[in-house]
Amino acid sequence: MNNVTVPLPENPIATSAAAETLQFGEELAAAFKDELYVVTLQGDLGAGKTLLTKGLAKGLGVPDWYYLNSPTFTLINEYRGRLPLYHLDLYRLGDADELFELGFNDYLADPGVLVIEWPEKAEDLLPSRNLIKIRIEIVDSEKRRIYVSRS
């Protein structure tokens, strides 16, 4: 099933400042209901993946969302809000088997928002329901083009 239960914007979304990327994430998360959502983020280093995740955290009511950082070395950061937010960075992951060692299936079992940076190693393991794929392109130092698609 290719079903996302929140409305998605028309593509591409053009942002001209970091605050607009943050706002996009906040507005998207505000529409999330008490279900599991998986948001994959793709983009070059510095594209704004973590900034967009901060916006999602803000939209979920995560206290001190602005302290959120990329889990590049920890692999997973967890935050409590209206729904739990699990932020994964798979850049340093060797293969999909390592995901199971981290308890990946547990994150898919309950309502929450699972944000995955560098998702290529997990694509075959992701549910199709509420799978939102986001690709961020750098236009210049401030501007971004954001593409959003269902699974």
Image (cartoon, grey):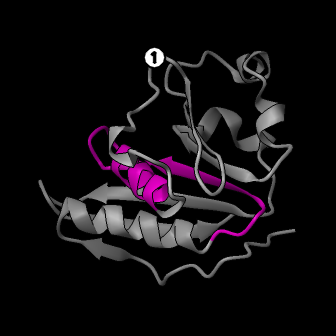
The one nearer the camera, 21 or 90, is 21
Q: Where residue 139 sits in the image (x, y, percent)?
A: 20, 61
Q: Where residue 8 sits in the image (x, y, percent)?
A: 57, 78
Rendered position, 107 above or below 135: above
Instruction: Specify the segment rendered in magenta.
Output: 32-58
Q: Where residue 150 sits in the image (x, y, percent)?
A: 66, 69
Q: Quadrant of the N terminus?
A: bottom right
Residue under numbered circle 1: 73
Mark 1, secondary structure of its residue: loop
* Residue 102, quarter of the rendered image: top right
- Furthest-front residue in this view: 63
Q: Is residue 42 magenta?
A: yes
Classify residue 100 as left or right of residue 37: right
Classify residue 105 as left or right of residue 58: right
Rendered position, 45 above or below 53: above
Does the rendering let one see residue 98?
Answer: yes
* Residue 34, quarter of the rendered image: bottom right
- Amino acid at dot 1: Phe
Label 1 Cα crowd, 10 Å radius (few <14 / some 14-19 / many 20+):
few
The one nearer the camera, 14 or 76, is 76
